[in-house]
Image (cartoon, rainbow, N blue to C red):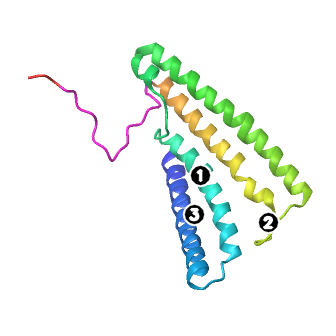
Amino acid sequence: MRRLADGLLRSGIIIVFAVLLVCVSWQVISRYALGTPSTLTDELARFLFMWLALVGGAYTYGQGRHLAIDLLPTSLSGRRRQVNEVLITLLIAGFAAVVMVWGGLQLVQRTLASGQISPSLQVPMGWVYGAVPLSGLIIIAYAVANIGRIARGGTTLNPPQDLPAPQEDRLS
């Protein structure tokens, strides 16, 4: 199930990034080569960038590749490390639940209720802001999976698969 979710998120992020790249490229071409900048691609690029940043950040958290200060977690071992990782994961999930999901849903509901639409694309702005609660839900799902992994004796820290594992330096 997790592999399927990871694959879907990764594919979605790649597609959004590709469309964003096309929009920005067309924006540059239309502005400098044609002399008439496209307002549609400008607005679409802004919205796609927001979705890419939020959903991409949630995916990055799920892969354990997010920016983190890991001085304390790496200096602990055994049960203390597990407790520390569970507490950190709960704090992240709490933030995602309160600020991103609950607060994001409030923002989406208020924006949809006000009838605010984007100027060029004529898209309800609530759909655009929907990236916030969706990303929060993704973070919570990954946090639950991480707590399960910790409970089974694992860690939330995932070394990148494309890099070799660090080797111990030994003095000869």
Q: Is residue 154 magenta?
A: yes
Which secondary structure type mostly characterizes the magenta part of the structure?
A: loop
Element on which disc 2 rests: loop
Tag 1: Cα neighbours inside 10 Å, few (<14), some, or many (≥20)? some
Q: Nearer the viewer, mark 3 or mark 1?
A: 1
The residue range painted magenta reads 153-169
110 to 89, vertically: above or below: below
Left/right placement of residue 149 relative to residue 89 reads: left
Q: Circle 1 sits on which residue?
A: 53
Q: CA distance from mark 3 to mark 2?
A: 19 Å
Q: Residue 73 at x, y = what percent?
A: 45, 22
Element on which disc 3 rests: helix
**Residue drawn 69% across and 52% down?**
131
Q: Circle 2 sits on which residue?
A: 118
Q: Circle 3 sits on which residue?
A: 16
**Residue drawn 89% across and 61% down?**
115
Q: Amino acid at mark 3?
A: Val
Q: Are marks 3 and 2 in contact (CB under 8 Å)?
A: no
Q: Quadrant of the C terminus?
A: top left
